[in-house]
């Protein structure tokens, strides 16, 4: 599997252990990679990949130079792009702008790319139309070399077989379009905690990506943690960042609003469907980590 569109193979030394984990934390910002015994590496973009200052400007530029991205999503998935919309202003750096077509030297990101093919997200209008739409789109747009799809709420009600169908369709697309990097994604939080079906199905996606050397944008993991690393999923965190602060079974606080209030000037206002601006900020930071990795950055 391709980890970089510039580097078609990643040579791992024999000294690396099976499943060596290079975590990306707030200190070094290096995205998690999981090494397996065939030398391939899965790329896991999660809450540890939200330090935008850790991504070198040269890596951002390489992504802009090399990537042509098609993104399919509905409202929840828009958090990535609405966060990206305001990031350049927040950083006072035009390098972080994007456009459909990559005009004026911006990142080429085709937003809502598949709508004209009657496919809107991984579960709308059904759980398979997106795959056919992807094929039709790639055939009509051969310059596209990254495809990323998001879920709306369909992982919450998915069966194990539903998720396996998604994984199989993605894997077949990878086989049929070897020059394209396909990004897997988990479903947004819904307040059902660690024992809920959503978490179980997200874990199914994560395990598949780690075992089979895939690229994963872990949407749910990003919104499970605040920027201080506090973990909220087990205490009924949902997509709005609400959680059960006193563990009595009722969501009574909002970690994003709390953090925004305590860190004035460290976040930026933006549209964040179903959620708070901070959530979209974090999604945008992680998206640029993903673009940089796909553009050739090793994460270090």
Image (spheres, helix red, strand yellow):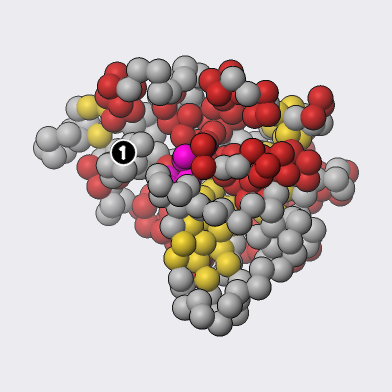
The quadrant of the rendering that contains the C terminus is bottom right
In this view, the residue in front, 256 or 131, is: 256
| Whether residue 161 is visible | no
Q: Position of residue 24 (x, y in %)?
A: 45, 52
Q: Is residue 207 above or below residue 229?
A: below
Residue visible at 43% across and 31% down in the picture: 279
In this view, the residue in front, 131 or 76, is: 76
63 falls in the magenta region = no
Q: What count of labels does the image hold? A: 1
In this view, the residue in front, 18 or 163, is: 18
Q: Position of residue 218 (x, y in %)?
A: 48, 49
Residues rendered magenta in the picture = 47-52
Residue visible at 74% across and 61% down in the picture: 7
Residue visible at 22% across and 42% down in the picture: 235
51 falls in the magenta region = yes
Circle 1 residue: 228
Magenta-highlighted stretch: main secondary structure? helix
Residue visible at 20% across and 27% down in the picture: 252
Q: Position of residue 151 (x, y in %)?
A: 54, 42
Q: Name the image quarter holding residue 68.
A: top right
Q: Secondary structure at mark 1?
A: loop
In this view, the residue in front, 29 or 70, is: 29
For this view, does 182 lie left or right of residue 260?
Answer: right
């Amino acid at each position: 599997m391709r980890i970089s569109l510039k580097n078609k193979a990643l040579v791992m030394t024999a000294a690396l252990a099976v499943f060596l984990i290079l975590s990306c934390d707030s200190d070094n910002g290096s995205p998690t990679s999981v090494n397996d015994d065939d030398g391939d590496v899965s790329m896991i973009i999660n809450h540890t990949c939200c330090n935008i200052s850790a991504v070198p400007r040269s890596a951002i530029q390489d992504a802009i130079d090399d990537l042509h991205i098609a993104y399919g999503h509905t409202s929840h998935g828009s958090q990535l792009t609405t966060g990206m919309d305001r990031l350049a202003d927040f950083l006072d750096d035009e390098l972080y702008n994007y456009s459909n077509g990559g005009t004026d030297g911006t990142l080429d990101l085709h937003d809502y790319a598949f709508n004209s093919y009657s496919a809107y997200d991984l579960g709308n209008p059904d759980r398979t139309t997106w795959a056919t739409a992807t094929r039709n789109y790639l055939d009509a747009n051969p310059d596209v070399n990254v495809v990323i799809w998001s879920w709306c709420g369909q992982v919450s009600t998915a069966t194990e077989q539903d998720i396996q169908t998604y994984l199989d369709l993605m894997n077949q697309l990878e086989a049929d379009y070897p020059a394209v990097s396909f990004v897997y994604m988990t479903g947004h939080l819904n307040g059902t905690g660690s024992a809920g079906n959503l978490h179980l199905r997200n874990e199914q996606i994560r395990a598949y990506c780690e075992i089979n050397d895939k690229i994963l944008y872990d949407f749910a993991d990003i919104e499970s943690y605040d920027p201080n690393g506090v973990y909220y999923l087990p205490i009924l965190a949902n997509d709005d960042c609400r959680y059960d602060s006193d563990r009595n079974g009722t969501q009574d606080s909002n970690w994003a609003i709390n953090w925004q209030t305590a860190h004035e000037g460290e976040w930026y206002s933006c549209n964040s469907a179903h959620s708070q601006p901070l959530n979209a900020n974090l999604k945008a930071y992680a998206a640029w980590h993903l673009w940089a990795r796909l553009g050739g950055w090793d994460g270090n």
